[in-house]
């Protein structure tokens, strides 16, 4: 890092970042379903539990003086499990439905990004180094995780099934990656598009693991699937480089 750069509180966006992110979203789906469905605590109670955990981790993350890989990814996992149960509560318990839930949550994501941009002049993640920007960052992430759950269920239940849904979102991510390398579209915009798309990809993969065979799944135990994915994430954090992002001091970058 150069002497004119300020360390971010979030990791550098690399291939390793996306591998762990997709695994974390998959764990969010299987872990959220384990608590709400396998343990039969229900969507509302599970949402309260995971939201409480998320608030604790976000507070720790914001109070930390530098980037800590395990704390960061624990916060991501808390947001994605909370997103799973909150989306299921809105879609199924409140009866909003997948379409209504997806549109409502997309509005929330865009609203937070709009407020963030109005406040800071950028929504680039490599500028996340102050408590105010971190608050915007984690609010955006939580809404995007919840949106991704609703979107994944919507697509999977509309016909393609869980495996087909995973292929749809995987193809969409491949298109975003192609746009990153071969077009002049804002990298900040493409980052958030990819970040949102990884959530429904993880949701459909998670559902593919644990849903009954009659519903197109593999009927794997949710707790077992969650344990395997958690172990994979742990290995990735230990093996793959985990570096803090950085941005030039005293400037605001409008691209990533």
Image: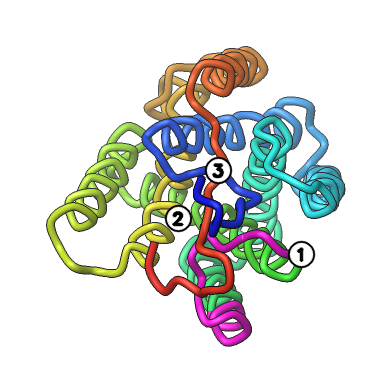
Q: Residues within 10 Å of mark 3 (few under 14, many from 20)?
A: many
Write the residue at 48% across / 46% down. 199
Which residue is at the far left? 182
Judge by depth and name the residue closer to the eye, 221 or 106.
Answer: 106
Q: CA distance from mark 3 to mark 1?
A: 16 Å
Q: CA distance from mark 1 to mark 2?
A: 23 Å
Q: Residues within 10 Å of mark 1 (few under 14, many from 20)?
A: some
What is the quadrant of residue 5 in the picture?
Answer: bottom right
Position of residue 238 in the picture relative to residue 165 (left or right): right
Which disc number belongs to residue 11? Answer: 3
Colour mapping used in the image? rainbow
Provide the residue span drawn in magenta.
114-130
Q: Residues within 10 Å of mark 2 (few under 14, many from 20)?
A: many
Q: For residue 121: magenta?
A: yes
Instruction: Give the mark, 1 or 2, whose residue is nearer the N terminus.
Output: 1
What is the quadrant of residue 120 in the picture?
Answer: bottom right
The residue beneath circle 2 is 196
The residue beneath circle 1 is 131
Write the residue at 69% across / 28% down. 34
The quarter of the picture where the C terminus appears is bottom left
Asked if disc 2 and disc 3 are in contact, CB closer than 8 Å, the reply is: no
Residue 7 versus residue 26 in the image, above or below: below
Residue 6 versus residue 114 in the image, above or below: above
Residue 134 versus residue 149 in the image, above or below: below
Judge by depth and name the residue closer to the eye, 79 or 42.
Answer: 79
Asked if disc 1 and disc 2 are in contact, CB closer than 8 Å, the reply is: no
Write the residue at 69% across / 30% down. 70
Label 2 element class: helix
Label 1 element class: helix
Q: For residue 147: magenta?
A: no
Write the residue at 52% across / 74% down. 251
Measuring from the top left, give residue 77's x and y in whole percent: 65, 38
């Amino acid at each position: 890092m150069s002497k004119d750069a300020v360390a971010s509180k979030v990791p550098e966006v690399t291939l390793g970042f996306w591998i762990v992110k997709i695994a974390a979203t998959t764990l969010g789906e299987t872990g959220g379903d384990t608590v709400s469905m396998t343990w039969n605590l229900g969507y509302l109670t599970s949402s309260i539990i995971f939201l409480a955990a998320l608030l604790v981790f976000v507070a720790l993350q914001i109070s930390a003086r530098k980037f800590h890989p395990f704390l960061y990814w624990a916060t991501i996992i808390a947001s994605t499990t909370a997103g799973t149960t909150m989306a299921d509560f809105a879609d199924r318990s409140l009866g909003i439905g997948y379409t209504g839930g997806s549109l409502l949550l997309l509005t929330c994501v865009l609203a937070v990004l709009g407020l963030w941009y109005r406040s800071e002049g950028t929504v680039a993640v490599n500028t996340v180094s102050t408590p105010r920007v971190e608050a915007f960052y984690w609010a955006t992430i939580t809404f995007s995780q919840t949106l991704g759950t609703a979107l994944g269920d919507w697509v999977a239940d509309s016909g393609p099934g869980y495996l087909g849904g995973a292929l749809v979102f995987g193809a969409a991510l491949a298109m975003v990656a192609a746009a990153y390398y071969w077009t002049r579209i804002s990298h900040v915009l493409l980052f958030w598009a990819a970040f949102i798309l990884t959530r429904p990809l993880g949701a459909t993969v998670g559902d593919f693991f644990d849903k009954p065979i009659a519903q197109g799944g593999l009927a794997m135990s949710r707790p077992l699937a969650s344990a395997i994915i958690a172990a994979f994430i742990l290995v990735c954090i230990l093996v793959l480089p985990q570096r803090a992002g950085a941005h030039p001091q005293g400037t605001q970058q409008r691209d990533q």
